[in-house]
Image (cartoon, rainbow, N blue to C red):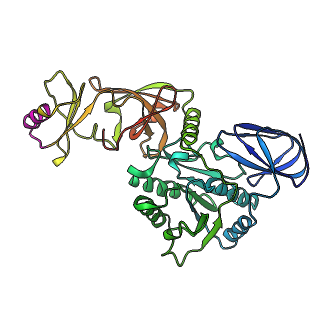
Amino acid sequence: MKLKEGEIYLVKGKTTIELIDGEVEIIGKKVKKGETVYVPYGKTVPVEVLSDAEVNFDNYEKIPLRTIPPEWDEVVNRILNENLKKVIVLGEVDTGKTFFSTYLSNKIIEKGKKVGIIDADLGQSDIGPPGTIGGVILEKQEIFLSEIPPTFLYFVGAHSPGLHFLPYIAGVLHVLNKLINRVDVVIIDTPGWVQGDGGRAIRRCELEVVDPSCIILLQRNDEIEHLVKIYKDIPIIRLKVSKKASSTSQEARKKLREEIARKYFKNLQKITLNFDEIETDRAYLLTGKKIEINDGNILHAELLSGWEGALVVSERKLDIFEIEKLKKEIGVFRIKNIVKGKEKNLVVGLLDEKRDVLGLGIIQEIDYKNGKFHILTPFNEKDRIKIIQFGSIKLSENIEEAGFIEPGYF
């Protein structure tokens, strides 16, 4: 297909853009003759023709005007001229925050700077698998951050920070601290939860811990002004959401998450970790003192700390009479009951001795009797794994979403 200089096309994934001749720009990156760009499912990109070109693509429409306003380039200049090192991007769902962050990054890199991006959108993660906060160091332009392995990863273990406030906030700060002295500018791409008790609370806490040099609001009107009313001493840049910003259905979001998860969880191998070789985190399991209980239904038991009582793993759920009996027998006021099998398909973080994420795994089984974890993971350096960090996401054998475990169950 022949394209004329100055023409603009919107290309919708899943498709491939093959540039046979000429030059185009996609999300701030110049694409030259011979290059190929894969557009994933659920993504739409503008292709701006910089010189007469020949291109192979499908699933497109020609549009009369740029989708990227000139104000975006003014933001780039302001960030560099005022040395605004920590830039946080806020906006509702489907306001184009990731698109904007990518464009911003590409234009800053074009000026010879090194950029760090933090992807804090747990449910629509581009950097790293779903349920994580990913950070990447960029020295060259990129179109889709999902095509780049994360430089740093923090495991939250959920698609939303709703029941994981503290791990989410800790994760943003953890990745920020890893990036801040390695790059010229850090861009923090945030989730679209900006309203209600939870949305207000988590965005305010996030702003407190990040202490940004600049806040960028992507809004249709003034729908997120409530988040920045107290920030009189920090530059606040207000940008209108592009009219071409596309909405994504819940089903499409789920499909996108699963596609990214499948990409991550390919080439799986089964590993076995012994109870006495590793520590657990975000779990009661293996944090107490092991005790023996003579009951065929009970596979494993521990005396926990202080008023926490005892943890009891059983083949089937304990009834109220069994729980009362165990309380008296052990001498505690509380029994935490884990049922064997609940662990199947649970996604966990695999950490080294410095508590850095090495990779993720999917629990196949916990063999409580013999003290072993059986885990599927793409990470192939088993001896480096020292900590298993529990999450809430479950994925089936086909890497499809398969349920949720409330934090604290294990």
Residue 59 on image: x %, y %: 76, 39
Q: Residue at x 70, y 54 (%)?
A: 244
Q: Which residue is drawn at 35% across and 31% down?
A: 343
Magenta segment boundaries in residue numbering: 322-333
Q: In this view, does 354 lie to the left or right of 192?
A: left
- The number of numbered discs placed on residues in the rendered structure image is 0
Q: In the picture, which quadrant includes the N terminus?
A: top right
**Observer-nearest residue: 35 or 64?**
64
**Observer-nearest residue: 327 or 213?**
327
**Observer-nearest residue: 131 or 155?**
131
Q: Please determine whether, in this image, residue 52 is positioned above or below residue 252.
A: below
Q: In this view, does 38 lie to the left or right of 18?
A: left
The residue sitting at the bottom extreme is 232
Residue 16 on image: x %, y %: 76, 37
Q: Residue at x 57, y 44 (%)?
A: 249
Quarter-wise, where is residue 373 in the image?
Answer: top left
Residue 4 on image: x %, y %: 91, 50
**Observer-nearest residue: 40 or 336?**
40
Q: In this view, does 156 lie to the left or right of 70?
A: left
In magenta stretch: residue 327: yes
Q: In the picture, which quadrant includes the C terminus?
A: top left
Residue 15 on image: x %, y %: 73, 37
- Most frequent secondary structure within the magenta stretch: helix
Q: Please determine whether, in this image, residue 403 is positioned above or below residue 96.
A: above
In magenta stretch: residue 136: no
Quarter-wise, where is residue 202 in the image?
Answer: bottom left
Q: Is residue 258 left or right of residue 11?
A: left
